[in-house]
Image: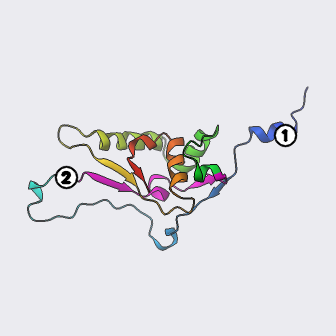
Amino acid sequence: VPLISTASFAMLAPPHLDRTPSAHSRYTNAGIWCFERPFEGQEKKPPVRLIVFDCDETLTLSTFLPNEQDLRTRLDWTTEWADYISTMNFESPFIEVSRLEKLREMLGELVEGDEHVPSRVLAVLTRNNAGPVACLNLLKAAKLADYFTAVW
């Protein structure tokens, strides 16, 4: 029986993912708020057209990224571990359905609109310590990037 060398085994293992916190996460409460303030004449105005999401613990459940410089600086970054990284950041162990599929469905509905609601523009505003390029690359790995017009 041939043995697998230590070097070969290391190539099979997923990358180590560091918890990459947002610069402000320790000062916020857990949760998500989405609202439109009521005002007089509201029914005569068009609905919200721009929706801005935070990345960390809003789109992601928690953010874990490989410690790679290219992830933070290159827009063409790719990895063979995209599915693993996406699962660690977006999927929940507490539900049986795919949270990523539900996110894609919701974001698609927001972008496309329907006969009752116009399409919306989606953006991400992040204070993640790894920066907006890393956030964009994480969204690409999860196949969510195409729903967003901008990432800051």
Is residue 92 something that shows in the picture?
no
Kindly give the residue lying farthest to the bottom in the view shown.
27
Boundaries of the magenta span:
48-69
Quarter of the figure with residue 118: top left
Picture quarter with the N terminus:
top right
Q: Which residue is depicted at the point 35% across and 56% down?
A: 52
Q: Nearer the viewer, residue 122 or 107?
A: 122
Q: Which residue is depicted at the point 67% across and 54% down?
A: 67
Task: Residue type at mark 2: give it.
Answer: Pro
Q: Position of residue 78 (x, y in %)?
A: 60, 40
N-terminal label among 1 and 2: 1
Residue 42 horizontal side relative to residue 92, left or right: left
Q: Which type of secondary structure does the marked residue at label 1 adopt?
A: helix
Above/below status of 51 relative to 37: above
Residue 115 horizontal side relative to residue 44, left or right: right
Return the residue at label 2: 47
Residue 7 is labelled as 1
Q: Position of residue 59 (x, y in %)?
A: 45, 52
